[in-house]
Image (cartoon, helix red, strand yellow):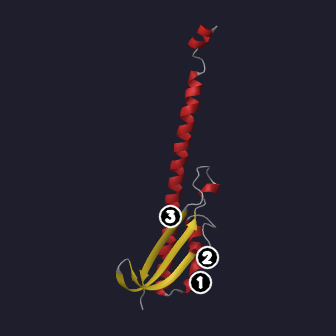
């Protein structure tokens, strides 16, 4: 009986697939998660840049710049990605080593990915900053 079990190869492929499948699924979910983080960061960067420009130009749409940034991020990434409380809008006399009067927008939001994919990537803070030279 022992010899028959030792030579029996039925089910070996299923066991091999189970081991390899778990590894491949983990790698795939990690790559999807990293891609989503990059996509989110890109959308937040675009919202920060547009908001800094809007503030620097004194556009009427930017009467409440933090809300403006949250609205843009909601349109470009997905609704509710950040709140106005996660947006900081300041004026500064330099940006990245360049002197001048700048509007600076910083966005720091906790990443939402943990609620979508079981990849352990929840709680990641995505931070972006943008400056635009003011006309004043």
**Residue 85 - label:** 2
Q: Quadrant of residue 1?
A: top right
Name the residue located 56 percent from the left edge and 24 percent from the top edge: 13
Instruction: Give above or below for 124 relative to 8.
Output: below
Instruction: Sort mark 3 into few (<14), some (14-19) or many (20+) by Cα contacts within 10 Å.
Output: many
- N-term mark: 2 or 3: 3
Q: Quadrant of residue 5?
A: top right
Cα–Cα gap, marks 2 and 1:
12 Å
Cα–Cα gap, marks 1 and 3:
22 Å
Cα–Cα gap, marks 2 and 3:
17 Å
Instruction: Give above or below for 112 relative to 88.
Output: above
Residue 28, given in percent of the width and then of the height, sits at: 53, 44
Residue 136, given in percent of the width and then of the height, sits at: 42, 92
Choose between 68 and 84: the one closer to the eye: 84
For disc 3, the marked residue is 41
SS of the residue under disc 2: helix
């Amino acid at each position: 009986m022992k010899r028959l079990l030792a030579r029996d190869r039925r089910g070996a492929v299923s066991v091999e697939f189970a081991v390899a499948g778990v590894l491949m699924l983990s790698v795939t979910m990690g790559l999807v998660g990293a891609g989503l983080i990059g996509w989110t960061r890109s959308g937040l960067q675009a919202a920060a840049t547009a908001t800094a420009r809007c503030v620097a130009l004194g556009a009427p749409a930017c009467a409440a710049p933090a809300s403006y940034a949250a609205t843009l991020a909601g349109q470009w990434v997905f609704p509710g990605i950040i709140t106005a409380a996660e947006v900081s809008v300041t004026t500064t006399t330099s940006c990245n080593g360049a002197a001048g009067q700048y509007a600076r927008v910083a966005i720091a939001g906790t990443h939402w990915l943990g609620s979508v994919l079981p990849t352990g990537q929840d709680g990641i803070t995505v931070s972006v900053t943008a400056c635009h030279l003011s006309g004043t």
